[in-house]
Every structure is written in structure tokens, then in C-alpha cells.
């Protein structure tokens, strides 16, 4: 789990968005973190400490004179155990206190006494956010090394619309997890294909496959978490776009091919890594009908003719100055030999083979990495964990480039 062994001090200040900190505390724990909550007095007017006590299983502190801390040094003791302090929501008032180094309650004192990173998710009315003092404080905090998460723009609790809306709990959890992820792909442009393709037979029917897109989306997310700039070309799937990833939706193999080539040929095109995870149809229907096929009186079935689709991975790998290419394969037997053959045929330095047949749609998987030096296994794990391992493998290969084919 990406936040395993992380101890986070979750500071809650007085804003309407305080209720979202409850969901965030759950999400952080789901990702493996332990969470200690500290609230300002104003925060307790919006949501009660017992909620967080129940959700985190830890006592909640609001008062620097709290007798539960043995040596009365809560303002220091609570930070020494923390890997980071995360203020969610961060009120305009609290940002001002942080920017000026004020320490007149437990949470602000903890922030000043900390020896760990500080992250803050501003949440306020758009006018409060836009005011010169708030903007001045934001600049000061950024210069001081505080990591601001958001805010975003949108509907606000006051009924207005604009900047100052707090990020949603899942977005915050993603950003916090990314904060703790080694930025091993920082500065890299990564292009990924994912999901199935759909080849029409007529306007309402088509041929597709069982790819869910989960592995490709997990890889896109892991690359982003590791600091890469990620573009995802996705076949038909209902999966949500990973945070910070640019997504282009396509349907057919030819559309996927064209979308990939557009990214490679665009005016400011630069792709360092191409990862082909999509299960692209080898064949399309050459005589697809423009109107719905109907049953005929004599019961004769339609005569479908097939035409070969372009091989996207091989075409990318064959380009002059090709990006570092990674292919995926679903071989059913003699994995290593077939994988090695396929890798050489496609002209790619790294081929990833799914071990086992039933990986489509599942949440876990087992992979075999095949390169010019041989092969090694990534043992069965969730697709999220495998994606993180694959990113590490990729980053190591990019740092020490080996033969490109
Ligand atoms: C109903 C209500 C909603 C508020 N919502 C916000 C808010 O979303 N963001 C904000 O910065 N301040 C908001 N405030 C003002 C803060 O609660 C106030 O500035 C308070 O002193 C903040 O204290 P703290 O920073 O110590 O938690 C709100 C006040 C009230 C009464």
C-alpha cells in the first residue's frame, strides 16, 4: 500500500469543507497510513472530534493544554511522530497564521514546531481566496516550502462559483500519495494506450474483447504519481481518468493508431516512453454496414470480411528516434519463448507478458518482464502494486539505457 508505514498528522481548521476531512481520513487509512487528527477550535464548530476519534481510532487533540499528553509538550510530541502534517481544510485565517509564523493554538504551534513537511488544502469563498492578503500569504507559504494542494474551481457552499473550492478527498489522497512517491519519472513524457478496441459490424454491433483497461489505467496513474507527464489513449471503458493524466478516448484500432501518431507528430511532440497496454484488435470488419443488418427471409447469415489493423506498437518502435517502447502480451503457453519472439518481431526493448489467461477484468495479475537480457517475474499482486513495480523497472532502465531492441 502506497502510504504504508506513513504517519500523518491531519490538521482540521474552521471551514465548511471540514466534513470532507472525515472521508479523507478514511481514504488515507485505506492506503495504509495511520492518522492523528488535531483540530482548531473553529473546526470543532463544523464537525465533532468524536467523528474523527471513531474513524481513526486515535484520540483527537484540540487544546495545547490537553492533560492526556504525559509531559505537557503536545505541541512538539505530536509532530515528532509525523511523516507530514496535512491541513485539510486550510482556512484563510489559518493560512495567514502559517505565513506569519503565529502559534496561538495547538495546531498552529505544531506547524511551527514541526520537523516534517507541511501540506495544506485551502478551502474558502472565491473572494476570500482572491484577496491580496490571501494571495500574499499563499506566495509566502510556497516560498517557505509548504506544499499547497489545490484549491480548485467550482460550486461553493456559499452558493457562488469560482476558485477556492477544496479538492475532493480522493484527489487529495492522490496528491498526498504522490508527495510520498519517489519522482523517478520527473520530466518524462509518457504515452500509454489502454483498454479494448471496438470494431463495428454495423451501427449497433461490433467486435471487441474482454480487456477492462485496469492495467493500463493503473500504469498511467503510477507514471503520473512518479512525476511523469502522462497522456492516455483509451479504448471504450468506464474507468475514471487518473488524476493529472491527459486522456483521449477512441473506439477502433485505427482511431487508436491515429491518436498515438498525432501525439508523436504534433507541433510540440515529445514522447520519451510509449507503453502499449491496450488490447488492440488485429482485425476489423472490412465490409461493415452503414445501416443495421437485418435478418433475411432465407435465414442466410451476413458474410463478414476481415481486414488487418495497423500494428501500433511496431509502427511506433520503427520510427526514427522512437521513444523507449514497452509492449504487453497475453501469451497462453511457453510464455518466455513466445514473448521473446514477439519482443524481437516488434522491435521493442521491453515486453511485459501476463502470466495466466484470466487477467482481463481482474484486480490482480502476475507479470513476466522480458528484455534482451532475459526475463524476470513480478509476482502476483494488485494491478496498482504491479504498476508501481513496473514504473521502478522502467525508471531504472531509462536511467541506465540498455539495448533498445
Ligand atoms: C458558517 C461559516 C463558514 C465558514 N467557512 C469558511 C471557509 O470555508 N473557509 C474559510 O477560510 N473560512 C471560513 N469561515 C471563517 C472561519 O471559520 C474563521 O475565519 C475562523 O476564525 C477560522 O479559524 P481557524 O483558522 O483557527 O480554524 C467560516 C465561518 C462560518 C461561520
Image (spheres, helix red, strand yellow):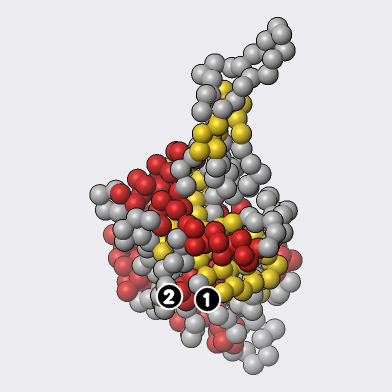
Residue 114 left/right relative to 354: left
What's the CA distance linking mark 1 and mark 2?
9 Å
Image height of 75 relative to 315, above or below: below
In the displayed orientation, state which residue is furthest to the top: 297
Residue 28 left/right relative to 187: right
The residue indicated by pointer 2 is: 402
- Counting residues from the start of the chain, the first of labels 1 and 2 encountered is 1
Q: Secondary structure at mark 1?
A: loop
In the displayed orientation, state which residue is furthest to the bottom: 71
Give x and y (percent) for residue 240: 56, 48
Q: Is mark 2 within 8 Å of ligand 1?
A: no
Camera sees residue 221: no
The residue indicated by pointer 1 is: 373
- What residue lies at 54% left-to-right and 49% top-to-bottom? 278
Camera sees residue 357: yes
- What residue lies at 50% left-to-right and 72% top-to-bottom? 372
The part of the image, by quadrant, that contains residue 74 is bottom right
Give x and y (percent) for residue 215: 60, 56
Give x and y (percent) for residue 93: 43, 65
The part of the image, by quadrant, that contains residue 52 is bottom right
Give x and y (percent) for residue 63: 60, 77
Q: Nearer the viewer, residue 382 or 24?
A: 382
Image height of 224 relative to 285, above or below: below
The part of the image, by quadrant, that contains residue 208 is top right
Q: Nearer the viewer, residue 167 or 130?
A: 167
Q: Are marks 1 and 2 in contact (CB under 8 Å)?
A: yes
Q: Nearer the viewer, residue 169 or 276?
A: 276
Image height of 266 relative to 121, above or below: above
Amino acid at each position: 500500500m502506497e502510504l504504508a508505514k506513513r504517519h500523518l498528522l491531519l490538521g482540521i481548521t474552521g471551514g465548511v469543507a471540514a466534513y470532507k476531512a472525515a472521508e479523507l481520513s478514511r481514504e488515507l487509512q485505506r492506503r495504509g497510513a495511520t492518522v492523528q487528527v488535531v483540530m482548531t477550535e473553529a473546526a470543532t464548530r463544523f464537525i465533532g472530534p468524536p467523528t474523527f476519534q471513531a474513524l481513526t481510532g486515535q484520540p483527537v487533540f484540540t487544546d495545547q493544554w490537553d492533560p492526556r499528553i504525559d509531559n505537557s509538550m503536545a505541541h512538539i510530541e505530536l509532530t515528532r511522530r509525523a511523516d507530514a502534517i496535512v491541513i485539510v481544510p486550510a482556512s484563510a485565517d489559518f493560512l495567514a497564521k502559517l505565513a506569519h509564523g503565529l502559534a496561538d493554538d495547538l495546531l498552529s504551534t505544531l506547524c511551527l514546531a514541526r520537523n516534517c513537511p507541511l501540506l495544506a488544502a485551502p478551502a474558502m469563498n472565491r473572494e476570500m481566496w482572491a484577496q491580496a492578503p490571501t494571495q500574499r500569504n499563499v506566495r509566502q507559504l510556497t516560498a517557505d516550502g509548504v506544499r499547497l494542494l489545490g484549491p480548485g474551481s467550482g460550486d461553493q457552499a456559499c452558493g457562488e462559483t469560482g476558485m477556492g473550492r477544496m479538492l475532493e478527498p480522493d484527489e487529495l489522497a492522490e496528491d498526498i500519495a504522490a508527495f510520498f512517491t519517489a519522482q523517478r519519472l520527473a520530466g518524462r513524457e509518457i504515452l500509454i494506450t489502454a483498454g479494448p478496441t471496438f470494431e463495428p459490424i454495423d451501427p449497433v454491433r461490433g467486435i471487441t474483447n474482454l480487456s477492462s483497461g485496469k492495467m493500463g489505467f493503473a500504469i498511467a496513474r503510477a507514471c503520473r504519481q512518479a512525476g511523469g507527464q502522462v497522456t492516455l489513449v483509451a479504448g471504450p471503458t468506464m474507468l475514471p481518468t487518473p488524476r493529472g493524466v491527459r486522456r483521449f478516448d477512441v473506439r477502433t484500432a485505427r482511431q487508436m493508431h491515429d491518436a498515438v501518431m498525432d501525439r508523436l507528430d504534433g507541433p510540440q511532440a515529445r514522447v520519451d516512453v510509449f507503453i502499449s497496454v491496450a488490447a488492440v484488435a488485429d482485425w476489423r470488419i472490412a465490409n461493415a454496414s452503414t445501416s443495421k443488418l437485418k435478418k433475411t427471409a432465407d435465414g442466410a447469415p451476413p458474410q463478414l470480411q476481415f481486414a488487418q489493423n495497423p500494428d501500433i506498437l511496431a509502427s511506433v518502435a520503427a520510427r526514427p528516434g522512437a521513444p523507449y517502447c514497452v509492449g504487453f502480451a497475453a501469451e497462453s503457453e511457453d510464455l518466455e519463448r513466445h514473448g521473446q519472439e514477439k519482443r524481437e518481431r516488434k522491435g521493442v526493448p521491453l515486453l511485459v507478458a501476463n502470466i495466466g489467461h484470466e487477467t482481463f477484468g481482474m484486480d490482480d495479475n502476475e507479470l513476466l518482464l522480458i528484455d534482451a537480457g532475459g526475463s524476470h517475474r513480478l509476482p502476483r499482486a494488485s494491478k496498482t502494486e504491479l504498476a508501481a513495480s513496473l514504473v521502478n523497472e522502467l525508471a531504472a532502465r531509462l536511467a541506465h539505457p540498455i539495448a533498445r531492441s
